[in-house]
Amino acid sequence: MRDPGYYGGIVQSIETPDRRGRTANIALGFDNLADYLTKNSPYFGCITGRYANRIAKGRFTLDGTTYQLAVNNGENHLHGGDVGFDKRVWQAREIREHGAVGLRLTYVSPAGEEKYPGTLSVTVTYRLTVRNEIRIDYHATTDAPTIVNLTNHTYFNLAGEGSGSIYDHRLRLNASRYTPVDPTLIPTGSLDPVAGTPMDFRRPTAIGARIRDNFQQLLLGQGYDHNFVLDRRDDTSLALAARVSEPTSGRTVTIRTAEPGIQFYSGNFLDGTLVGTGGHIYRQGDGFALETQHFPDSPNQPSFPSTVLRPDGVYQTTTVYEFGTTSAG
Ligand code: BGC
């Protein structure tokens, strides 16, 4: 049978047990395809690309040529433009391996799509492993110099989607620095220490504990919407990025990645206009996203790790989400 294709690489639901074995769907989303197509999904569960997060004014220069991408978020480019990878139909092949099942998704983005240079051939592999992990491997090659930055945009609520706010969830981020932003949420270019600020999640802290602090960066993001610079020993291996636990259910998620950064987004722009999978309305703070990535606006920030991909190179990266429970409250 011909593969009918897979819209946006969207992870629609993730069912995990709580500490007493009761299962709930902990990923925000819709219960039908039509809503993803028509309801202006805020990137629920999808693959974002070619460039996850923002590029200032949608513009960058590569090898002396300036490219103007779509401007779809105020004056900036967000998550790949008007029709990013979240809205493309991917080819899907089932994987069955020892210790894992999954899907291999492929998509060839033609040169000029969303005004990006280079034909980008992308493979994203989802695996569900016997260790209660979702492992995502990203791979891309190009036939001309281009930029690429891929992530998955799942929103989590470990108490179950539609169950209310995530402000009681305890978050630990393995990051001593973050990239502060300007009023349009573009990094200023500096890497600021988190120490002594509400951005410090080096010890597990409730997401809501300081979200109403009078701290300029929280005003700009209307909450947390920031890229954190991961503390890592080397550039390539999987390193701990984040761990979240929810006190009532005991559910946890631990995220490891090969990427240098992670966007922590506290669902600030969920505004009560969307009805989720279980029939409940999503309001501000009802889900959080932790998007492993290169830093926003890297093509315009020479001091940030590079997102340039050339024909002789391979883009390859991995993120693992491990689900569990804790008995601690
Ligand atoms: C961005 C937010 C944005 C959200 C949904 C996040 O990755 O950082 O600013 O609102 O995605 O589009």
Image: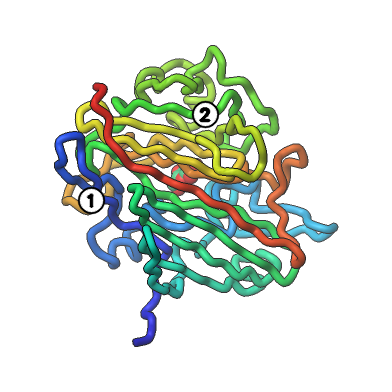
Q: Quadrant of the N terminus?
A: bottom left
Q: Is mark 1 within 8 Å of ligand 1?
A: no
Among the 4 quarters of the image, the one containing residue 34: bottom left
Vertical placement of 324 versus 145: above or below?
Answer: above
Circle number at residue 174:
2
Which numbered disc covers residue 72? none
Vertical arrangement, residue 92 with respect to residue 198, above or below: below
Ligand 1 within 8 A of label 2's CB? Answer: no
Evaluate whether residue 181 shows in this view: no
| Residue type indicated by callout 2 | Asn
Q: Position of residue 107 (x, y in %)?
A: 52, 71
Report the quarter where the C terminus lies: top left
The number of discs equals: 2
Which residue is drawn at the image coordinates 46% and 34% (left, top)? 242
x and y, in percent, of residue 325 in the image: 27, 35
Q: Residue at x 67, y 32 (%)?
A: 188
Q: Position of residue 101 (x, y in %)?
A: 36, 63
User: In percent of the image, x 58 and y 62: which residue is there?
Assistant: 139
Circle 1 sits on which residue?
275
Q: Residues within 10 Å of mark 2 (few under 14, many from 20)?
A: many
Tell me which residue sits at (66%, 66%) in the image: 141
